[in-house]
Amino acid sequence: MNSSVSPETVRTTCAYCGVGCGVLATREESGAIGIKGDPMHPANFGRLCSKGSALGETVDLEGRLLEPRIGGKPASWDTALDLVASSFAETISEHGPDSVAFYVSGQLLTEDYYVANKLMKGFIGSANIDTNSRLCMSSSVAGHRRAFGSDTVPGTYEDLELADLILLTGSNLAWCHPVLYQRIAAAKAKRPAMRVVLIDPRRTMTSDIADMHLAIKSDGDAALFIGLLGYIAAQAMVDRTYVDRYTSGFEQALAIASSHDLRSISARTGISPEQLREFFNLFTQTERVVTVYSQGVNQSAGGTDKVNAIINCHLATGRIGRPGMGPFSVTGQPNAMGGREVGGLANMLAAHMHIEDEGHRDLVQTFWNSPTIASRPGLKAVDLFNAVRTGKIKALWIMATNPVDSMPEADLVVKALQECPFVVVSDINSVNDTTIHAHVLLPAAGWGEKDGTVTNSERRISRQRPFLPLPGKARPDWWIITQVARRLGFAEAFPYETPAQIFAEHAALSGHGNRGSRDFDISAHSAISDVEYDDLSPFQWPQGRGEAALERRFFSQGEFYTPDQRARFIPVNPVNEEAADPRFAFTLNTGRVRDHWHTMTRTGKSARLSAHFAEPFAEINPLDAAVHGIADASLVKLGNDHGTIIVRALLTDRQARGRIFVPMHWNGQFAGDARVDKLVSANVDPISGQPALKMARVAMKPFEAA
Ligand code: SF4
């Protein structure tokens, strides 16, 4: 596939969600940027959603950071880079490698991620590099590794079109992954027998294609799938051949499942026994089933267990790795998956290798020819910012993310940044709630200027290509990190002049990935030239040397990456509900709206996108509103021990009683004090470290102006 379709039009990839749609970007004579879906891209075949279509409206230079700044004042690149390198070097020399940290982002391209991870783990010698993808999909990573021995998404988008039954759990696909929703809706229109079940506390817009809506309690998902496993066994629907040949641990998982009857599952999920039976029968009687899950599953104190409860049901029925079947985790960010490939999480090494494994460490250190290698996992996002707040981390570099608005207990993150002796932020914006705390601000390239690769939710690697010049003194993230690495004395190991060189090195290392697992191997591209890189067509991993790319993983013959090559059933207990507190009667759920992305630093620029919802709001059931004297469109105050926010009431029976939904996007820049994440406790899943952003207890009352 050619990189450009005409001199003015460039093939690239959308900057937003993990669907990873192909985009044709055209510089028009007027100076405007024309955006169309790429009909050749296998993720979207020409489709785009509202956010993707508006990409051209978000690339103006208003608010852009166009030069390095030190203490708020413009500085040259040399001065700023020298200061970053010398401050990190002094901190490391005085307090050790674990006194510094990088907090990176699923917005970074794979090449940026690779270089940042290499510098921190192989040359600084700490694993204190974590990512905002920790907040998005780390429970899926942990669940995959427990079950499969590797972080592999078994299926493809095509499986969603081939399935006869799709379970959407913890996923408002219609708004959060709209092109995947469109693909399912189109497939269902062609095959009316296809069934869709929505499992969500709210009747979201995704219910428009659902044949059944299970209005589950927050955190009821694990219980639901535990109940399903018990039902599968009770109905003699276990695929014994598959379970006996290719899995281990079934009896232990079943023992827990069998200890819960329909009534106890009903109490834990809030779903009636009749509806549970109807749903369980639908699952057991349909061969081609895909279970799609996203943040509603991952962002939980029991997120990893929820993931394994889902996978257990697919293993028990042998419905995995075949057309139209399998558990399918959808990532939130454009390059959450790419970050996983290069080890951009505190508990991973490069190429999906394991920090805890001495053999893996030796392999990576030898490949990098590095003086050191991190020997234990670093701090995950919540712990990392706690360590900044308590003074353990003294120099922090934040890249392409806005943690003040996205982390739980956000006010504590502000405190951490205020107290940290040295904060560097690389960003495209000059002012947001995080950049205002930076001692050094570094101007990064934005979408349309960046050059590299991203990997979407179905393991498909696509190019992001530039079609705009770098504005002012902005530079790509990989270049900035490389310059600092050279100043730290590692010039030989960071010789990169183009992103293609970094991709080739990453591809070569992937050929050694996970020792025995070929899943992450893209070594077919380890000698890629700049020209070939420019023309690189979207492809799915794995693709080893001289091999064709593979689409579906874990065919019916098993091939898992555990020591005995069997998939593991994980015994899972239901997630316990947060203890009720009479002061805080409502369960708060957070999430996205259709037309905004994360903290709105880009989508907030588009009047068209902002017209969908002009301000932050709380979805409240009308009966709850009546009890509390709250009128539609009036202002309400939501609060708990962490703080309060004031938002507009939106009364709707799509919301169940006792529950409130508030979108996560609005922040200090756009809506004063309406950062909903400051109300969420920093509870994390004990295995993945992912914060439970989907659940907080709050009180609600009408807002009365003083
Ligand atoms: Fe972009 Fe996601 Fe919309 Fe596709 S579905 S256009 S990747 S935001």
Image (cartoon, rainbow, N blue to C red):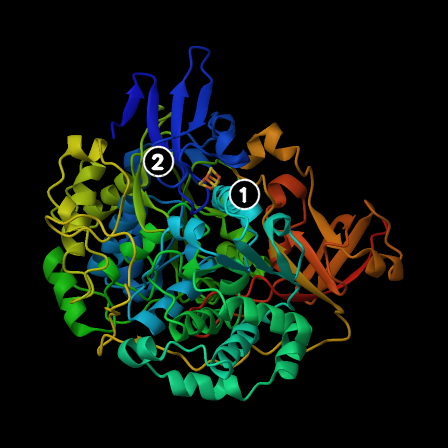
**Residue 279 sits in which quadrant?**
bottom right
Furthest-top residue in this view:
29
- Front residue of 38 and 234: 234
Secondary structure beneath label 1: helix
> Taking the image as drawn, is residue 450 in sight?
yes
**x, y (%) of residue 700?**
78, 61
> Taking the image as drawn, is residue 82 in sight?
no
Kindly identify the amino acid type of the residue bearing the numbered disc 2. Answer: His
**x, y (%) of residue 87?**
32, 51
Secondary structure beneath label 2: loop
The residue depicted at 13 percent of the width and 67 percent of the height is 362
- Front residue of 605 and 217: 217
* Earlier residue among tags 1 and 2: 2
Tell me: residue 556, above or below residue 487.
below
**What distance separates the C-alpha of mark 1 from that of mark 2?**
22 Å
Residue designated by label 2: 41
Tell me: residue 254, above or below residue 621.
below
The residue depicted at 24 percent of the width and 41 percent of the height is 483
Residue designated by label 1: 189
Kindly identify the amino acid type of the residue bearing the numbered disc 1. Answer: Ala
Mark 2, residues whose alpha carbon is within 10 Å: few (<14), some, or many (≥20)?
many
**x, y (%) of residue 219?**
59, 70
